[in-house]
Amino acid sequence: MIILMEKPSLRTRISLLNAAYSGGGRAITLRSDEIHLGSKGESIKDTAKILSHSGDLFVFRTSDHQKAIEFKKYLSIPLICGLSNKSHALQAVSDVQFIEETLKKNISNATISWVGDGNNNVINSLIEISAKLKFKLNIGCPKKYSPKESLKWAKKNGGKINIYNNPKKALKNADVVITDKWISLHETNKKQKLKELKKFQVNSKLMSFAKKNAIFLHCLPASIGKEVTKQVLYGKQSKVYRQAENRIASVKSVIEYCLK
């Protein structure tokens, strides 16, 4: 497995390496500044052709989703997107598996609530997988930060997705509450965004609108005091460390699927 990281990674990298080695495989990890890709003079096409003759599986983590699409065109080995600005499918697959095991029921019988920025890579992938697996997904976000392309696709494909501009309504009867960082590296107006998302912070009061035994998830790293409070992140309902651990098991499943 050849892993190319254009963005930093802890959980994704560890889960990929653990999954590869525990299954008897091997992994080569590359950084973008170590190879000739892009500005250093080698095309994605040429890179993809070389990679296809050098390994059995390619994992790409990037800020530019179009690069992943371009790689897919020229690779003759399976591609796993380890994250992009539009998608984090590895996280979504792992979270679904973890939710089912934790709640001990099929996710189609659960209500999942997302709170905060409704237009980032993690929620895009959750929206897509919710349409595939037919589970109820409630999204609480300001109108300005509502999902766009992924929501259109999901609704065309039978997704059961509700958008609420009131976070309390989004959490009503939720089995699972999920959030993610509000501020990414490419943000230009951070202060304004924090102000607009302030009432969507997951705190103890907001969690009280979900079911009593609801669990809290966050893909980490978290910004305490912004999208989530310390009390919730480290509280009894939080499962964030077990959620992260589950990434290893879920990546094994993805690798197995890709190599069938």
Image (cartoon, rainbow, N blue to C red):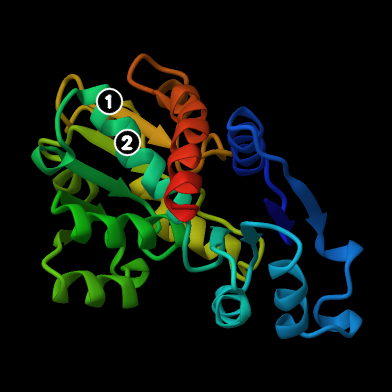
Which residue is identified by label 1?
Answer: 101
Amino acid at circle 2: Gln
Q: Nearer the viewer, residue 198 or 130?
A: 130
Which residue does the image show at 72% across and 81% down from the upper left?
Answer: 44
Dot 1: element: helix
212 with respect to 240 (left or right): left
- Mark 2–mark 1 Cα distance, whole angstroms, equals 6 Å
Q: In the image, is residue 199 above or below residue 98?
A: below
Mark on residue 61? Answer: none
Residue 148 in sight from this viewpoint? no
Instruction: Give neighbour class at mark 2: few <14, some 14-19, many 20+ (Cα, 10 Å).
Output: some
Q: Nearer the viewer, residue 156 or 22?
A: 22
Which residue is identified by label 2?
Answer: 97
Residue 155 in sight from this viewpoint? yes
Figure quadrant of residue 5: bottom right
- Asked if the residue at tag 1 contacts the one at tag 2, i.e. Cβ–Cβ closer than 8 Å, the answer is yes
Which residue does the image show at 10% across and 35% down from the upper left?
Answer: 173
